[in-house]
Image (cartoon, rainbow, N blue to C red):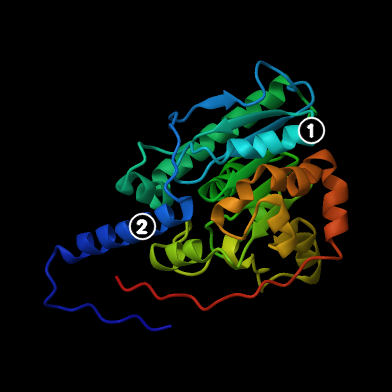
Amino acid sequence: MSVCPRDSRASNDRPRRSVIGRAMLAAGLLIVAVGGCAGTRQATQVSQATGGNSGMEHGLVLILPGILGKTPFEPNIGKGLADANVPLAVEEYDWTQGPLLLVGNYANLTGNERKQQQARQIAQRIMQYQNQYPGRPVHLIGHSGGGGMVLLALEVLPPGQKITSGILLGAPVSPDYDLRVAQSHTDAGIHNFYSKADVPMYAVTAVVGTMDGHHAGSAGSVGFNVPEKLTAMQRRQYERLLVQHEYSFDMVAKGHPGGHFGWTSRAFAKQWVAPIIADPQTAIADAATATATPVCYPAVTSQR
């Protein structure tokens, strides 16, 4: 994979202009995907979606929004779970920084230091809950950039500390992201929902980069690849703990036309996400014979 040589005559302002240009493109594409809607952001704060301590004794679902922060979309996931009579408590944790600004959005996608700091806070919330309610199920659901945060939070959990499952909805991480550490902190694995119709997100990650720094279509657009250098036993374990859900047209009837924010449809959450939470072991077993091989697009070379 070749990289174009740097122009020796370029001024020192070129890297800065490149970053600003990428941020502007990303913001434009995100605005297209959002359709002009944005909600009031509450910085790095957990809010109880179900009210009071309702459901805490049954388990916890922690929802992480995308890089835009708190929008009107993600609460629909919790409402869909409630429609399906999921008894677990639901919380939304806004890990982003704001307000909803171009530079802030770009920083949320690429700022490694902040992502790691927020991942540790999310892990602390998980451990706090598990200490108070030992043995109860815990699920992490991440939409868009929140999906990347699900993986980072799992990776910083202490050895032996596990949740039930991680659910990724259109996550902007690279298809070759190695999930083994994250998987080791789950009992029922990681579910990845992806859509090849999510063209704006494909463009964002190809130009700006994924949350793990690759310029390519994301796992939220084309699915994850299984690492090549695995033993047969490691490969079986990897595939057992990775359930890939490709977008299908029967999701249209549930409010998901294939784009980036269709994953937050209330009806979609009731139909596809709630069963994973209600019976995670059955969900992963049923998917074992129905996983599809993702089609991966060529990487876009970064010219720095």
Q: Residue furthest front?
A: 253
Q: Nearer the viewer, residue 250 or 290?
A: 250
Q: Earlier in the sequence, mark 2 or mark 1?
A: 2
> Where is residue 104 shown, x and y percent of the image?
34, 44
Task: Find residue 229 and report its image quarter.
Answer: bottom right
Element class at badge 1: loop
Residue count near mark 2 (Cα–Cα under 10 Å), binned few <14, some 14–19, many ≥20: some
Q: Is residue 263 left or right of residue 56?
A: left
Task: Give the residue drawn at x 78%, y 21%.
Answer: 57
| CA separation in Å, label 2 and label 1 | 37 Å
Tally of marks = 2
Tell me what residue is drawn at x 64 percent, y 34 percent: 62
10 Å neighbourhood of mark 1: few (<14), some, or many (≥20)?
A: many
Residue 161 visible in the current orientation: no
The picture places residue 83, in percent across and down from the top left corner, at 76, 34
Along the line of sight, the residue nearer the viewer: 39 or 91: 39
Image position, residue 259 (x, y; %): 57, 59
Question: Looking at the image, is 95 positioned above or below residue 214?
Answer: above
Q: Does residue 160 appear in this view?
A: yes
Q: Which residue is mark 1?
A: 86
- Please name the residue shown 32% across and 62% down the image: 22
What percent of the width, then of the height, locates residue 216?
48, 70
* Looking at the image, residue 37 lies above or below residue 298: above
Horizontal side, residue 86 vs residue 302: left or right? right
Residue type of the residue flagged with mark 2? Gly
Q: Which residue in the structure is indicated by mark 2?
A: 28
Q: In the rendered view of the protein, which quadrant contains the C terminus?
A: bottom left
Q: Quadrant of the rendered structure where residue 237 is? A: bottom right
